[in-house]
Image (spheres, helix red, strand yellow):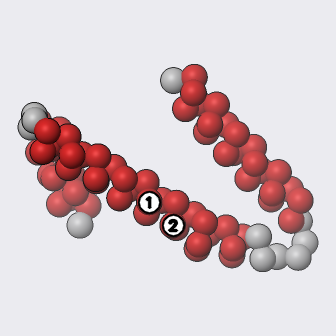
Amino acid sequence: MSPLGIVLGMGLSQSRGPSAALAQCLLQGLAAGTFLYVTFLEILPHELSAARGRLPQVLALLLGFSAMVTLRFLG
């Protein structure tokens, strides 16, 4: 599926018009939603279920999210 996504993305990036912009927005939203779903519903519950070492994990999580937000607003 990755090569198909690459070809689709390359095709959409070359095309112009309102329908191409709508398709790009929809595909970017789908990609972002997939990342959020995997992060919050599959990875984080598994990582934070351990009884030991929870505080360093939460602090690293907050530090990572803070770094990404900072990069987003600076760039």
At x 69%, y 75%, the residue is 46
Query: The residue tagged with tag 2: helix, strand or loop?
Result: helix
Assign the N terminus to one quadrant of the image: bottom left
Classify 25 as above or below 58.
above
The residue at the far front in this view is 18
Residue type (three-letter) at the residue carrying disc 2: Tyr
Whether tag 2 and tag 1 are in contact, CB under 8 A, the answer is yes
Looking at the rendered structure, the number of numbered marks drawn on it comes to 2
Determine which residue is flagged by label 1.
Answer: 33
Determine which residue is flagged by label 2.
Answer: 37
> Is 47 on the left-hand or right-hand side of 43?
right
At x 64%, y 31%, the residue is 70
Looking at the picture, how far across and down is residue 44, in whole percent? 67, 67
Q: Can residue 48 be seen in this view?
A: yes
Residue type (three-letter) at the residue carrying disc 1: Gly
User: Which quarter of the figure has residue 65?
Assistant: top right
The residue at the far top in this view is 74
Looking at the picture, how far across and down is residue 48, in whole percent? 76, 70
How much space separates mark 2 and mark 1, taking CA atoms? 6 Å
Query: The residue tagged with tag 1: helix, strand or loop?
Result: helix
> Is 6 on the left-hand or right-hand side of 62?
left
